[in-house]
Image (spheres, rainbow, N blue to C red):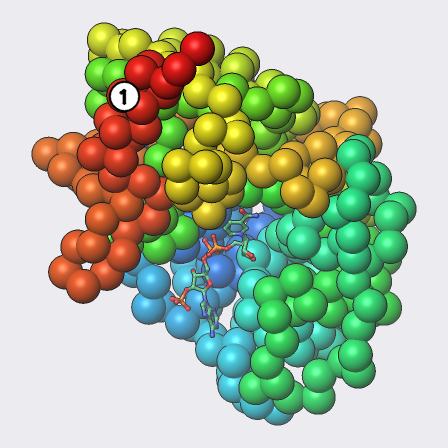
Amino acid sequence: MNKRDFIKTLGIASTATFLSPITASGFKIFGDINKKVLILGGRGFLGPTIVETFLASGYEVTLLNRGKTNPELFKYIPVIICDREKENKEGLKNIDKKHKETYWDIVVDTWQKSPKAVSDFLEEFKGQFGHYHYISTISVYDKWDKKFIEESEPLNPLPKFPKAISEDFRYAIRKTFAEEAIRERIDNFTIYRSHGMKSFRVTRPGDPNAEPFWPIRFYRGGEILLPNVHNHHMQVTDVKSLANFIVHCSASKIYGAFNVASNPTPFKDYVSSLIHATDMPKKLHWIDGDFLIQNGILPYKIMPLWRSKPVGAYYFNVQKAIHAGLVNRPMVEMISDQLEGYKSRYPNNDIVFGEIVQGKQMKYYASTKEKEVIKKWLSRPK
Ligand SMILES: NC(=O)c1ccc[n+]([C@@H]2O[C@H](COP(=O)([O-])OP(=O)(O)OC[C@H]3O[C@@H](n4cnc5c(N)ncnc54)[C@H](OP(=O)(O)O)[C@@H]3O)[C@@H](O)[C@H]2O)c1
């Protein structure tokens, strides 16, 4: 297999199969296009897919993190060990001179904690990088009170920018602050406002509450309860599509802020994708939303991807990103990836929803509850 074929293979491989050629054989791909990428983070939930996508596209990748999270990943990629949470830029200041003097064509920052860590990096590495990419969220918008919110809508009002890393704010405010810090310091940036990311990996490995409910429910088959709700849409971000878009924006020098997610998708279309991605025998029971609520199956908190309020929740406008080159993979592929990840973490398919396990309340609803509500629905007076 020549190098081009190899890279092509990597590009279409699943996350699981992709990791092995790099980590197991130590095969390094040095950038065909001779560009240096610094990924701040890279070994958590979203980071690995970004790393894999840059590698598969022929870039030379270096990571910057503390070496604590998933250290077994990307062992053959250089890692700059740095703690970004040290006050007064101590972690960044102690980075080896050779890295500080390197010019990084592309920086991808997945940071989600203190916005001060973002401004610290931009200041400490000033003049040492080209295109800076930041993973943000649609939570930066002040109001979700209408459908099809675009990038120009007002963002959360902010208090004073934190002086110390340790100043704590809620997630949406931290992300809005980080965006502000970027806009004030540089021009060559791309900001990705993502919505409900879904992937092979989960945000909190080892925590059953982080596992994907609907793909698992359909994978299990049987009699499935579903919400029959007028005009019910859902919207999520496929991590692999996002990573492809980041590489595309790097290669094509696309700057600015983008909402990144699937188009608002009818929930019934999502169910079709769930059926295609799983082949267990199943019978679907579409039950009126009001009936579900009366019986304790509440939107969002108990039943995921059903949310009627605020009205804009699953209707963010992603046309700007699509116009710039975002290609959302078919939902079926994303669901299949999610299931592959779940099966690798739970080979016995023994995850429990909606019950108390070892003193911890599991999210969503139990299979006993599902059966009970279906039975009640079928025997209701008509
Ligand atoms: N919209 C959504 O649904 C959604 C869902 C999930 C995530 N997100 C967003 O996506 C972004 C990506 O998060 P991710 O966890 O997937 O990123 P990631 O880059 O895959 O993982 C986080 C990285 O940060 C590093 N890190 C943690 N603390 C650090 C420190 N003090 N100094 C230096 N490095 C440190 C970790 O390594 P070490 O521990 O080894 O340092 C790890 O490699 C986040 O900003 C989050 O807000 C959005």
Q: Quadrant of residue 211?
A: top left
Residue 248 appears anywhere in the view: no
Q: Vertical placement of 22 versus 208: above or below?
A: above
- Secondary structure under tag 1 reads helix
Q: Nearer the viewer, residue 349 or 109?
A: 349
The total of numbered circles placed on residues is 1
Crowding at mark 1 (Cα within 10 Å: few <14, some 14-19, many 20+) = few
The residue singled out by tag 1 in the image is 375
Residue 139 appears anywhere in the view: yes
Q: Position of residue 248 (x, y in %)?
A: 67, 33
x 61%, y 70%: residue: 170
x 72%, y 39%: residue: 311
x 57%, y 63%: residue: 111
Q: Position of residue 314 (x, y in %)?
A: 65, 35
Left or right of 215: which side holds 12? right
User: Which amino acid, by three-letter code, is at mark 1?
Assistant: Lys
The N terminus - image quarter: top left
The C terminus - image quarter: top left
Q: Vertical placement of 100 versus 39: above or below?
A: below
Q: Quadrant of residue 109?
A: bottom right
x 46%, y 28%: residue: 291
Farthest residue toward the front? 381
The CB of the residue at mark 1 lies under 8 Å from ligand 1: no
Q: Nearer the viewer, residue 307 or 122?
A: 307
Q: Position of residue 289 (x, y in %)?
A: 52, 28
Left or right of 256: which side holds 166? left
Q: Vertical placement of 177 versus 110: above or below?
A: below
Q: Position of residue 120 (x, y in %)?
A: 67, 78
Q: Nearer the viewer, residue 268 or 308?
A: 308
